[in-house]
Image: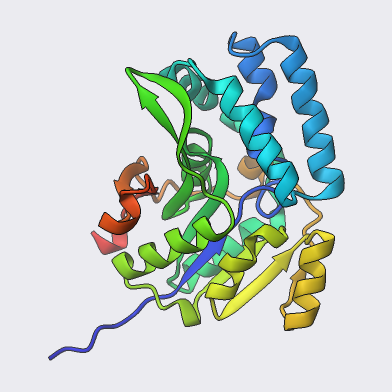
Amino acid sequence: MTPVVLRSAAFFDLDKTIIAKSSTLAFSRSFYQGGLINRRSVLRSGYAQFVYLAGGADHGKIERMRRYLSEQATGWHVQTVKDIVAETLHHIVDPLVYDEAVSLIEEHHAAGRDVVIVSTSGAEVVEPIGEMLGADRVIATVMVQNEGRYTGEIGFYAYGVNKATAIQQLAEDEGYDLASSYAYSDSVTDVPMLELVGHPYAVNPDKALRKAAIEQDWPVLDFVKPVELRKRVPFENRRGTLAAVALGAGVAAAGVVVATSRRSRRA
């Protein structure tokens, strides 16, 4: 019998790890211009962004943000959100990408590892960002839809231990060896994800994660150089459009969805 050869992967949180802001809140002005939210919501989103950047995303802040965004999104047309994100993606996200993160993504791909973005933000925002960055997979929050509109309910919340559960399922499906894999995050809420892999890194860590990293002897990285992605490197379009697939029966029953694209070298 031929032995199974396991592959390794690199799992990246998105906000404050790959990009310098909250990916969801960064689109608030575009949603306002598209008629989805009012001016008061834009101002509130700006304040939430400030609090998020200044104080870190602890459990209480994340929960308040989750409830707020769920309430805001109730009744929105899903296709409208996708269209707005597609039209404004490069203008909003390109200048926010950390140069150091892009270098790491390139290094992991060069070493033959899959790159997986794992974010609490919604799939409609994270999937196109993942495609832009050349990610192989995306794990993100999934909002329940009915007749093309958001109901305000969350099918899968990619947060805390849920991220770890989704990664474990994906590793089983794709044959990733987590002991030789890497993970990067800025938040203490992602400790379950970091503890899964053999090579965890704290990136721009909040106070609690920095303390945990010191206690567990995890390397700490400081990313400080946002760069316009298109000017930094001529990214070749190595990925097709990201398509949503279930992670497996056990997790899919809870609504976990992963975006995936097969790399051409494995075709």
Can residue 92 be seen here? The reply is: no
Q: Is residue 110 left or right of residue 91?
A: left
Q: Residue at x 50, y 21 (%)?
A: 81
Q: Is residue 210 left or right of residue 34?
A: right
Q: Residue at x 48, y 74 (%)?
A: 111
User: Residue 92 appears in which quarter of the rendering?
Assistant: top right
User: Residue 219 appears in which quarter of the rendering?
Assistant: bottom right
Q: Position of residue 101 (x, y in %)?
A: 66, 58
Q: How is the rendered protein coloured?
A: rainbow
The image quadrant where one finds the N terminus is bottom left
Q: Residue at x 75, y 51 (%)?
A: 58
Q: Position of residue 130 (x, y in %)?
A: 50, 46
Q: Position of residue 102 (x, y in %)?
A: 62, 56
Can residue 40 be seen here? The reply is: yes
The image quadrant where one finds the C terminus is bottom left
Work out whether 244 lies above or below 114.
above
Q: Residue furthest right?
A: 54
Work out whether 223 lies above or below 2.
above
Q: How many marks can you see?
A: 0
Q: Nearer the viewer, residue 253 or 205?
A: 253
Q: Is residue 170 left or right of residue 191?
A: left
Q: Nearer the viewer, residue 2 or 202?
A: 202
Work out whether 115 lies above or below 55.
below
Q: Position of residue 75 (x, y in %)?
A: 48, 15
Q: Nearer the viewer, residue 24 or 261?
A: 24
Q: Residue at x 66, y 41 (%)?
A: 63
